[in-house]
Amino acid sequence: MQTTHRERTRSTRKAARAIDRGPRRPGAEHALALVRTAVYSVVATAWFIAVTLFSAWTLLLPGERVRLALSLWARSDLWLLRVIAGQRYEVRGLENVPPGAALIASKHQAEWETQALPAILPRSVIILKKELLRIPLYGQYARHFGMIPVDRSAGAAALKPLAEHARAAMARGAQLVIFPEGTRRPVGAPPDYKPGAIFLYERLGVPMVPVALNSGVFWPRRRFVRYPGTVVVSFLPAIEPGLPRAEAKRRLVAAVEGETARLVAEADPALAYAPSPSS
């Protein structure tokens, strides 16, 4: 029996919703993870408030002098994730990150990488959506540490000020972290790379380090739960500066998507998928 167009459309939409919701573990495993996540969330929130209030006086000091506080908080949060939620992490290929100026172009599947990368890369400055600066306490600290906000609604008009802020950060010795897709993408979703990363690659003339990860397997997008397991973040060989725009993007997408698919399959063979080309 042949399926109708409506049935195919319904099936496609159902599959898309399943991808967007992210992976879910069976029964008791999911329930236990929810309990551990709830405990982690309460403890981590209390710890975050305590640290930010106690450290408020550091806002009077130059941001570069107190970046250690950001790294220490990030590491302590990762420790809480490990002890309470059972979520560990492994870093691979860190030797691929140049000692000097670099653009770190990372896959974005979960909130995990926004917390972990400052701990892994102490000199990193994250390019983030400007809405995050409205969060009480977090916004003040993000500005103070030199995080670079970008107005995603401004489209191409946001690129010029983004490049200016990026140059200033690199002049201070920072390494820039950008999420080329602009927002979190579910495990297995087709890639959707925005022009910002390649624009900065051309304007700044620095190596671009592709970063793959599988955080979405353990911290699904738009879900409260954090599953136990080992998140792997992989720093891949840097793309040398000076390549044509199309070639640089091709290399970035191929490296990030290929390694991300491999890491996802390594974490959970049931979620294995074939990487698709960028849209």
Image (cartoon, rainbow, N blue to C red):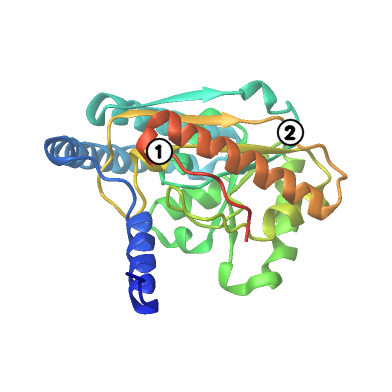
Quadrant into which the N terminus falls = bottom left
Residue shown at 51% from the left, 31% from the top: 233
Find residue 217 and report its horizontal and vertical position in percent.
Answer: 37, 40
Q: CA distance from mark 1 to mark 2?
A: 36 Å
Find residue 266 and report its horizontal and vertical position in percent.
Answer: 44, 28
* Residue 214 sits in quarter: top left
* Mark 1 residue element: loop
The amino acid at mark 1 is Ser
Find residue 134 and report its horizontal and vertical position in percent.
Answer: 43, 62
The amino acid at mark 2 is Ala
Closest to the observer: 98 or 62?
Answer: 98
Question: Is residue 198 left or right of 23 when viewed as pictured?
Answer: right
The nearer-to-camera label among 1 and 2 is: 2
* Residue 82 sits in quarter: top left
For label 2, the crowd category at 10 Å Cα-Cα, with few meaning under 14, some 14 to 19 and many 20 or more, is many
Which residue has dot 2 on it?
238
Whether residue 54 is visible to the viewer of this picture, yes or no, is no
Question: Is residue 60 left or right of 39 when viewed as pictured?
Answer: right
Question: Is residue 215 left or right of 201 when viewed as pictured?
Answer: left
Residue shown at 49% from the left, 45% from the top: 59
Which residue has dot 1 on it?
55
272 relative to 97, above or below: below
Question: Is residue 70 left or right of 6 when viewed as pictured?
Answer: right
Farthest residue in the front direction?
1
Find residue 43 and report its horizontal and vertical position in percent.
Answer: 22, 37
